[in-house]
């Protein structure tokens, strides 16, 4: 297994659509920041991020379905991302990129208003640490720094506690909530959330676990103000 991972890491370095977070980036800056459309994708289409993309099922699925949009998967696990990067290479997908980095580093890679949508697919629920949850005010501030005004955030998760936490954040800041369901595949929803399934999602469905899904927006009103850490309550501790 270790030998296979090493081979995948080595191949990742040959992919022109795979990027890393070298230490020098913190001081020298990332060349494509603010220039993804002009210098990499070479178009003026919108950019969607999949944060914690794993094997990149959504990044690849969306790129196939929407050739006139751009998609970037971000994760720290290079061996996982190799799967999506390899597919993109084999299929010649020109609207796909992957970045191996921590999610809290995204502002080093993207300029303000460079991103239109964000997908959070089966994120680590982080039951003990609110700040580490990908829908905590801490991370919403990071998304705010790169999203367009009224930018869309999608969340799919099997974890009810994380889902309820996200809803509490949305309610606290009065973000527009476009859709919410505790059982996506019985909701009648027709859209991207049911078009693709991740590796883990397929496992959960086989076990009879319901999939939670919501879609909300970071509006301009909140994009211009600091998001405060939620007060500690029994609901969000």
Image: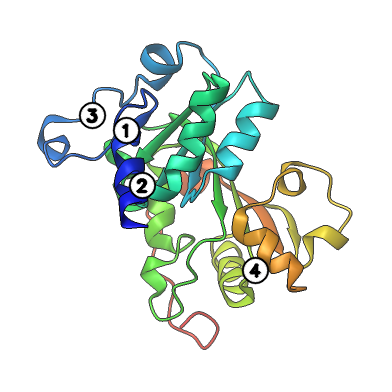
Residue 10 visible somewhere in the drawing: yes
Mark 1 to mark 3 CA distance (whole Å)? 10 Å
Q: Residues within 10 Å of mark 2 (few under 14, many from 20)?
A: many
* Alpha carbon distance from label 2 to label 4: 24 Å
Mark in front: 1 vs 2: 2
Structural distance between the alpha carbons of marks 3 and 2:
19 Å
Count of picture labels: 4
Most extreme residue toward the bottom is 234
Mark 2 or mark 4, which has the lower sequence index?
2
State the separation of the CA atoms marked 4 and 1: 29 Å
As drawn, is 34 to the left or to the right of 202?
Answer: left
- The mark nearer the N terminus, 1 or 2, is 1
Q: Nearer the viewer, residue 149 or 117?
A: 117
Q: Which residue is mark 3?
A: 30
Determine the residue positioned at 64% across, 75% down. Answer: 160
**Picture coordinates of residue 54, whole percent (x, y):** 48, 51
The answer to which of 46 and 122 lies nearer the viewer is 122
Q: Could you say whether the residue bearing mark 2 is in a helix, strand or loop?
A: helix
Element at label 4: loop
Residue 158 has which mark?
A: 4
Q: Is residue 28 above or below residue 205?
A: above
**Residue occupied by mark 2:** 78
State which quarter of the image contains the N terminus: bottom left
User: For the point 40% across and 37% down, which residue is it?
Assistant: 146
Q: In the rendered image, which residue does mark 1 sit on?
A: 19
């Amino acid at each position: 297994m270790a030998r296979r991972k090493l081979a995948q890491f080595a191949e990742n370095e040959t992919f022109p659509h795979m990027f890393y977070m070298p230490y020098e980036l913190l001081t020298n800056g990332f060349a494509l920041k603010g220039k993804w459309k002009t210098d990499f994708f070479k178009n003026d289409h919108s950019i969607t991020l999949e944060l914690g993309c794993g094997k990149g099922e959504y990044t690849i699925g969306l790129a196939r379905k929407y050739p006139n949009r751009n998609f970037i998967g971000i994760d720290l696990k290079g061996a996982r991302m190799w799967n999506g990067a390899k597919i993109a290479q084999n299929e010649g997908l020109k609207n796909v990129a992957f970045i191996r980095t921590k999610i809290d580093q995204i502002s080093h890679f993207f300029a303000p208003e460079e991103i239109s949508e964000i997908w959070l697919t089966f994120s680590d629920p982080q039951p003990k640490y609110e700040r580490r949850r990908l829908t905590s005010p801490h991370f919403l501030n990071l998304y705010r720094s790169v999203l367009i005004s009224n930018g869309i955030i999608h969340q799919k998760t099997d974890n009810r506690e994380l889902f309820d936490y996200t809803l509490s954040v949305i309610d606290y800041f009065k973000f527009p909530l476009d859709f919410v369901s505790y059982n996506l595949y019985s909701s009648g929803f027709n859209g991207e959330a049911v078009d693709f399934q991740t590796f883990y999602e397929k496992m959960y469905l086989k076990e009879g676990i319901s999939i939670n899904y919501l879609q909300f927006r970071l509006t301009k009103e909140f994009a211009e103000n600091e998001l405060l850490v939620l007060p500690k309550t029994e609901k969000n501790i």
